């Protein structure tokens, strides 16, 4: 076996064990010792590939958001779908990803709701591609809608981002513990629908 392939496999074993630990315990309660014991990996080997627990955690966060972003890009059509259908496809695709990859659920929620304070900037950098895709999809949805003349698409996007910040702040205030991913996704979906359609019945809003 070539050295490059052996290194890749060893690194992946460490990542697999770390994903299990961070998914089960979150960042704060996890430990390198537990990651070692789960796969029979020595600390020396782990620190050869990852200098610190922080670096290993950030690698898991990056892996989560890269895979999620790729999954959503493949799932979402570029055109030819109505607003409501696009919304349903998008949020269904998100839930399908987490159902197929349950280890990423807590890592995703921790990263978007309450990342470790000293890693907040670094976590944001590693989910930047996912954030950009969300904006891209929302802009695509808005392009097919007639907005009020005084509101631009970018203003609508900015408002939704504020909605998200408010929603995530509510989850933060609710206290520690694992977030129900299905409830979080339902709340995000509902917030976006309210932004797009308001709070009146659709037939009333169209008069």
Image (cartoon, rainbow, N blue to C red):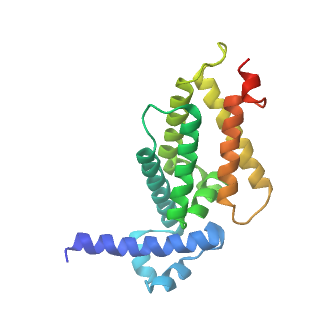
For residue 5, what is the image quadrant?
A: bottom left
Looking at the image, residue 174 sits to the left or right of residue 65; the answer is right
**Tag count in the figure?**
0
Which quadrant of the figure contains the C terminus?
top right
Residue 55 position, x and y percent, is 49, 63
Residue under the image location 43 percent in, 84 percent down: 42
For residue 88, what is the image quadrant?
A: top right
Which quadrant of the figure contains the N terminus?
bottom left
Of 91 and 152, which appears nearest the observer? 91
Vertical comparison of 93 with 45: above or below = above
Looking at the image, residue 119 sits to the left or right of residue 193; the answer is left
Residue 133 position, x and y percent, is 49, 40
Extreme residue in the left direction: 2
Residue under the image location 19 percent in, 74 percent down: 2
Residue under the image location 43 percent in, 83 percent down: 41
Vertical comparison of 84 with 95: above or below = above
Looking at the image, residue 59 sits to the left or right of residue 150; the answer is left
Residue under the image location 42 percent in, 35 percent down: 78
Of 27 and 205, which appears nearest the observer? 205
Residue 49 position, x and y percent, is 39, 70
Of 72 and 172, which appears nearest the observer? 72
- Asked whether the viewer can see residue 34, the reply is yes
- Asked whether the viewer can see residue 122, the reply is no
């Amino acid at each position: 076996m070539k050295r490059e392939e052996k290194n890749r496999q060893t690194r992946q074993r460490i990542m697999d064990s770390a994903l299990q630990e961070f998914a089960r315990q979150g960042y704060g309660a996890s430990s390198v010792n537990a990651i070692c014991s789960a796969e029979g990996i020595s600390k020396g080997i782990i620190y050869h590939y990852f200098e610190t627990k922080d670096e290993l955690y950030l690698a898991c966060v990056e892996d989560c958001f890269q895979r999620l972003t790729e999954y959503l890009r493949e799932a979402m059509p570029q055109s030819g779908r109505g607003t409501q259908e696009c919304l349903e496809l998008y949020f269904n695709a998100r839930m399908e990803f987490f159902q197929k990859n349950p280890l990423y659920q807590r890592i995703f929620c921790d990263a978007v709701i309450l990342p470790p304070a000293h890693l907040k900037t670094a976590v944001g950098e590693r989910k930047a591609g996912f954030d950009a895709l969300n904006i891209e999809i929302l802009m695509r949805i808005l392009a097919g809608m007639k907005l009020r003349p005084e509101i631009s698409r970018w203003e609508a996007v900015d408002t939704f981002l504020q909605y998200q910040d408010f929603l995530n702040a509510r989850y933060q205030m609710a206290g520690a513990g694992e977030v129900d991913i299905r409830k979080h996704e339902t709340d995000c979906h509902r917030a976006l629908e309210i932004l797009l359609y308001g709070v009146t019945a659709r037939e009333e809003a169209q008069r």
